[in-house]
Image (tube, coloured by chain):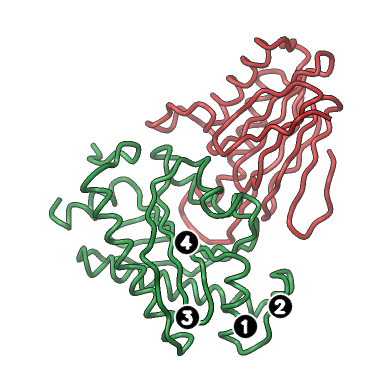
Chain colours: A red, B green
């Protein structure tokens, strides 16, 4: 077993087997795990918002699905991953509060998930598995060695996708 | 053009928001004392402007179980407010309020307990908002509360995303109430950018 690398909110990091990578307490945010199964170079991004182009203050690239995924892929390829072999698994995008509102923010979890699926599709990175939506938080652990994406939630069984 | 930049909020602006935090938390303490019919003391609140990655840590780790009560704010300013209570504090508070023994785990909470926590959140944020309203002469209304008991990080993602639309930092007001028991609570007020200007403008800034 290698080390467990920690990714914070609005953050992304590279991870090579045998190390593993985690992000804690995903709510409406999305954890995007990408991996090259041959070189076993992986990475994890914890994005908060779907689209950097809709926000004036967008210098933090790891905060957005579009810029975050692009940057994660860039550093993975620079670390020896093959751009064409990349596969992804995603989790998060929950709606934490059941509040009726006109505000778009309340559905941001669903909008995040939608954006991530669309962006990965455009980049031709297949999504092998996902665990998104519903109303609870998730902690995820990603193992580039095997591609396992482990999801933990309060009061629920540990899931491996 | 917004006058305030959350990433470069220094000096007098930060002091004003801090002072609003102090007064608001003071009123919230009074409300809590009335609710529990007991004497409640409050430590001087800690007000911090934190990076997103630091917030979870500041509240005892991203996986710390917390109860978050969330309300939208409307009227002259718009945004949202959240009151968070540590798991242990939520259990103590519920036991005290309902006159029942303390449960071991929040998973034992039923509809009644959830409802009571929502109401506590409503009263505390209400008194916080009314002091803000009095100070600024702005009309501030809060919506019906919604609750989530989950990992701190996932609850925080909601206000963090709102802050995330305008900056890379989040304003956290940490209060510690105590009488015979110790309660750790946090406020997160997220006005949108124009509302910040309105608040500061109405204070003559």
Quadrant where the image shows the N terminus of chain B: top left
Residue at the limit of the structure toward the left, as seen here? B204
Q: CA distance from mark 1 to mark 3?
A: 15 Å
Chain under numbered label 3: B
Image disc number at residue A82: none
| Front tag of 2 and 3 | 3
Whether tag 1 and tag 2 are in contact, CB under 8 A, the answer is yes
Q: Which residue is mark 2?
A: B103
Q: CA distance from mark 1 to mark 4?
A: 20 Å
Please tell me which residue lies in front, B79 or B130.
B130
| Front tag of 1 and 3 | 3
Q: CA distance from mark 2 to mark 4?
A: 22 Å
Chain under numbered label 2: B
Q: Which residue is mark 1?
A: B95
Q: Which residue is mark 4?
A: B186
- Identify the residue shown where x is 71% and y is 40%: A91
Q: Is residue B179 left or right of residue A140?
A: left
User: Alpha-carbon neighbours of circle 1 within 10 Å: few (<14), some, or many (≥20)?
Assistant: some
Whether tag 3 and tag 4 are in contact, CB under 8 A, the answer is no
Chain under numbered label 4: B
- Identify the residue shown where x is 41% and y is 69%: B125
Residue A14 location in percent, x, y? 67, 23
Q: Which residue is mark 3?
A: B179
Residue A21 location in percent, x, y? 72, 32
Up the image or down, B37 lies above or below B145; here it is below
């Amino acid at each position: 077993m290698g080390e467990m690398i920690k990714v914070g909110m609005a953050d992304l990091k590279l991870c090579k087997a045998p190390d593993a990578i985690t992000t804690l307490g995903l709510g409406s945010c999305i954890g995007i795990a990408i991996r090259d199964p041959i070189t076993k170079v992986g990475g994890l991004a914890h994005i908060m918002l779907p689209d950097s182009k809709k926000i004036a203050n967008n210098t933090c690239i790891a905060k957005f699905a579009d810029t975050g995924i692009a940057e994660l892929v860039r550093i993975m390829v620079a670390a020896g991953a093959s751009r064409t072999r990349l596969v992804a698994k995603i989790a998060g995008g929950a709606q934490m509060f059941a509040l009726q509102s006109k505000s778009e923010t309340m559905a941001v979890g669903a909008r995040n998930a939608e954006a991530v699926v669309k962006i990965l599709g455009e980049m031709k990175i297949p999504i092998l598995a996902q665990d998104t939506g519903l109303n609870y938080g998730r902690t995820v652990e990603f193992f580039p060695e095997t591609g396992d994406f482990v999801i933990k939630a309060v009061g629920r069984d540990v899931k491996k996708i | 053009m917004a006058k305030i930049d959350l990433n470069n909020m220094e000096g007098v602006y930060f002091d004003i928001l801090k002072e609003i935090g102090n007064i608001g938390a003071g009123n919230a303490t009074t409300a809590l004392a009335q609710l529990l019919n007991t004497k409640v003391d409050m430590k001087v609140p800690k007000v911090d402007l934190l990076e997103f990655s630091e917030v979870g840590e500041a509240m005892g780790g991203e996986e710390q179980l917390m109860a978050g009560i969330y309300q939208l704010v409307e009227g002259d300013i718009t945004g949202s407010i959240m009151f968070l209570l540590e798991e242990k504090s939520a259990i103590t508070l519920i036991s005290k309020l309902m006159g029942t023994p303390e449960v071991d785990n929040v998973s034992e909470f039923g509809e009644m307990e959830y409802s009571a926590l929502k109401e506590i959140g409503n009263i505390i944020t209400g008194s916080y908002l009314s002091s803000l309203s009095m100070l600024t002469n702005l009309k501030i209304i809060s919506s019906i509360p919604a609750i989530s008991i989950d990992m701190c990080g996932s609850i925080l993602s909601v206000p963090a995303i709102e802050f995330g639309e305008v900056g890379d930092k989040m304003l956290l007001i940490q209060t510690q109430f105590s009488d015979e028991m110790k309660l750790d609570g946090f406020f997160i007020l997220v006005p949108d950018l124009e509302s910040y200007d309105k608040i500061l403008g109405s204070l003559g800034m």
